Structures are given as structure tokens and as C-alpha cells.
Amino acid sequence: MEELLQGFGIFIFVVLAIIGLVAGWLAGLVAGKHKGKFALLGLVGAVLAPFVLALLGLGALAAGGLVAIIVVGLIGAALLLMIGKMIFD
């Protein structure tokens, strides 16, 4: 886990945060309500997804580069947003 954190750096964290916030904002626009909640869920999903995969033993994700981490962040944001949509509606 420490290797992933060192490999991430602050740049990747900021990129994931921006991706999550944008995904959540777009989900809030589509849903028409709960915009703040969706933005928060997108942020959490995008930032936590790479860490969860690293905890599951997929530490090679960092070797995949920036694109792989961004894709995982988008998938994490989307999954958490779908769960949030089911809870909020």
C-alpha cells in the first residue's frame, strides 16, 4: 500500500479528485437533485477505487500508468454513483 501511495503523488490524487467531482456533478445534473451528494460520492469513489484495488492485491495498477489509474477512478466513481442513485431515489 505504501508503494502505491508513494507512486501516486499529489498530482494523481488531485486528478482523481477532479475526475470524481466532475462525474458527480454530471450525475447531479442528469438526476436533477442531490447535486452535492452526487459530487461527494463521485469524489470518494474516484479517489478510493485505486486504493481498494491495491488492497485486493492489484498493486500492479500503478505500473499501468496515469491512464490506468484514471480509468479505475472513473469506474469507481460510476459504481459509487450508481449505488448512491439507488439509495437517494
Image: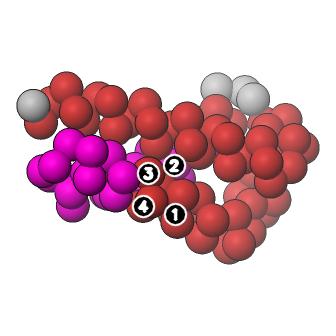
| Residue 36 seen | yes
Q: Quadrant of the C terminus?
A: top left
Decide: is 51 above or below 19. above
Asked if the residue at tag 3 contacts the one at tag 2, i.e. Cβ–Cβ closer than 8 Å, the answer is yes
Asked if the residue at tag 4 contacts the one at tag 3, i.e. Cβ–Cβ closer than 8 Å, the answer is yes
Magenta region = 25-50
Q: CA distance from mark 4 to mark 1?
A: 6 Å
Judged by depth in the image, the label closer to the viewer, 2 or 3, is 3
Judged by depth in the image, the label closer to the viewer, 4 or 1, is 4
Tell whether 72 sits left or right of 62.
left
Q: Which mark is residue 21?
A: 4
Q: Which mark is residue 23?
A: 3
Instruction: Tell me the residue that label 1 is attached to.
Output: 17
Q: Earlier in the sequence, mark 2 or mark 3?
A: 3
SS state under label 3: helix
Amino acid identity at mark 1: Ala
User: Who is closer to the viewer here, 51 or 33?
Assistant: 33
Q: Which mark is residue 46?
A: 2
Asked if the residue at tag 1 contacts the one at tag 4, i.e. Cβ–Cβ closer than 8 Å, the answer is yes
Q: Residues within 10 Å of mark 3 (few under 14, many from 20)?
A: many
Amino acid identity at mark 3: Ala
